[in-house]
Image: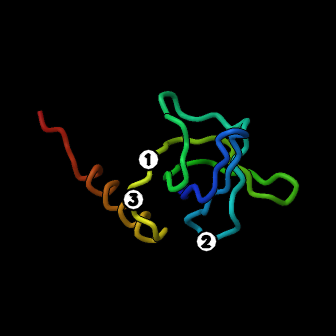
Amino acid sequence: MMGLLLWYNPETEVGLIWCEDQGPLAVLGADVPLPEGAGPLHCGDQLRFSLEMRDGLRCVRDVIDCAAATGETAPHEIMADFHRARDAERRLRVVA
C-alpha cells in the first residue's frame, strides 16, 4: 500500500496516513519499524507499507519505503508523481 503521512507527532512517533485505496486512514504507531537509514518522518512524506486490522482500525504493520515530502500538497498530485517515478525506474534496463 502507498500513502501520504497527513499528521505526525515526532514526540510520540504516532501518525495518520491517507491510503491510496481511498479507504479509512491508517494509524502509524511508535512500534512500527522504519527502513534502515530513514530519517525522521514529517507530514507530507510518502510511504509504502503493509497494513493489518487491529480492533477495527487499519494499522501500519511495517514501512517498506519512505520518501521525503516533495512540496506538492494535493494527494493525487503526489501519488501521480510517485507513479511516474516508478514507471521510469521500470523502463531502465541494464544491457551487457
The answer to which of marks 2 and 3 sits earlier in the sequence is: 2
Task: Name the outermost residue toward the front.
Answer: 11
Q: Which mark, by number, is residue 95? A: none
Q: Please give the count of numbered marks on the rendered protein.
A: 3
Mark toward the viewer: 1 or 3 = 3
Say what amino acid the circle numbered 3 marks: Gly
Q: How far apart are marks 2 and 3 (CA)?
A: 21 Å
Residue topped by disc 1: 68
Q: Which quadrant would the C terminus be assigned to in this image?
A: top left
Q: Residue at x 38, y 67 (%)?
A: 80
Label 3 element class: loop
Mark toward the viewer: 1 or 2 = 1
User: Dot 2: few (<14), some (14–19), or many (≥20) neighbours within 10 Å?
Assistant: few
Residue topped by disc 2: 22
Say what amino acid the circle numbered 2 marks: Gln
Q: Which mark, by number, is residue 71? A: 3
User: Dot 1: few (<14), some (14–19), or many (≥20) neighbours within 10 Å?
Assistant: some
Residue contact between numbered discs 1 and 3, judged by CB atoms under 8 Å = no
Label 1 element class: loop
Q: Which residue is drawn at 46% across and 71% down?
A: 74
Task: Name the outermost residue toward the right.
Answer: 55
Q: Which residue is drawn at 67% across and 47% down?
A: 9
